[in-house]
Amino acid sequence: MSALLKVEGLRVEIARRGRVMTAIDDVSFEIAAGEILGVVGESGAGKSVTGTAVLGLLERPAFQAAGRILFDGRRIDTLDEDAMRALRGREIAAVFQDPLTSLDPLMTIGDQLTETIRTHLDLTQAEAVERAARLLAEVGIPAPRERLASYPHEMSGGMRQRVVLALAFSCEPRLIIADEPTTALDVSIQAQILDLLRAMCRERGTAVMLVTHDMGVIAEVADRVAVMYAGRLVEVGPTQSLLAEAAHPYTRGLMGSIPDMHRRDVELAQIPGSMPRPDAPVPGCAFHPRCGQALPRCAVERPLTFTAGASEVACWLADPAARSAA
Ligand code: SF4
């Protein structure tokens, strides 16, 4: 399958008080048309920064220092602001954790939907209103025509996130960057929004980069998983095989954090220690201070990426040379 989105050797740096820190380091991945890629890791791993770079929304002091981002074979990280704005909303849409980031509190949801639709599609106002009402019905908003006149504050958090999905899909984008789209919602509502996102994507063949700290969300919707740690990709593989047999010790640690819906009494496993910050990088493998399987070389040599089963993994334990020597 050819890639719809291709990120090659992405490096994002942050320049602050005369120092340059690395937030994203040599990150490469692809998303095929219609595929849902879950990007997972703890807070600060670089997931959101990667999504922001794809959207062309990095802001100073963060900047892209190296790498390329290609959408449908065309390089987009070098586009000017107008061209990127035209691409966003039309071909690439975004869904953020807080619906109020995407919704204007001073505009009715009908006006927001029709404005977005008419900015990107050649439709009359009446046609845009018709499309907006259809979208609201599709995302499960009761009495959609009447709701067009509502303001965001007149809706619950779950309903607002449904409106954000309607807005994201309003111009039939080919890729959606969804950053923690359900984190702010109650657990029961989370499942509904994830089901809706997956169903709408499957129906339209829309690809998704789903950024989350929650392995449970990944297990629910993603076709493939990219695990990030301290600004690097540490494991990428198909969801089912990765859930069944994760190769990287960090991924296995995250797997311990999938809550078991039937065992509310069980405490979630925590990975001891914390992730290094960009201003205090760790040599070798960035995970080595927290890794229960670290080898002597892990503290000094940055791991290369190896194939382990169906996954690509950046860990010395997967080094075939080391395994054959053992
Ligand atoms: Fe652990 Fe070494 Fe693998 Fe890093 S490279 S995850 S420290 S075994």
Image (spheres, rainbow, N blue to C red):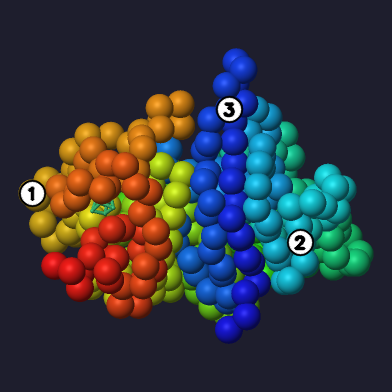
Q: Which residue is mark 2?
A: 75
Where residue 261 sits, quadrant-wise, is bottom left
Residue found at x 36% / y 35%: 282
How many C-alpha atoms fall within 10 Å of the one at disc 2: few (<14), some, or many (≥20)? some
Marks 3, 1: nearer the viewer: 3
The answer to whether mark 3 and mark 1 are in CB contact below 8 A is no
Q: Is residue 182 left or right of residue 142?
A: left
Disc 2 element: strand
Residue found at x 41% / y 51%: 228
Asked if residue 239 can be seen in this view, the reply is no
Asked if residue 15 can be seen in this view, the reply is yes
Q: Whole-Å distance between the Cαs marked 1 and 2?
A: 49 Å
The x and y percentages for residue 283 are: 36, 38
Q: Nearer the viewer, residue 109 or 299?
A: 299
What type is the residue that disc 3 sits on? Val
Kindly identify which numbered label has been placed on residue 265: 1
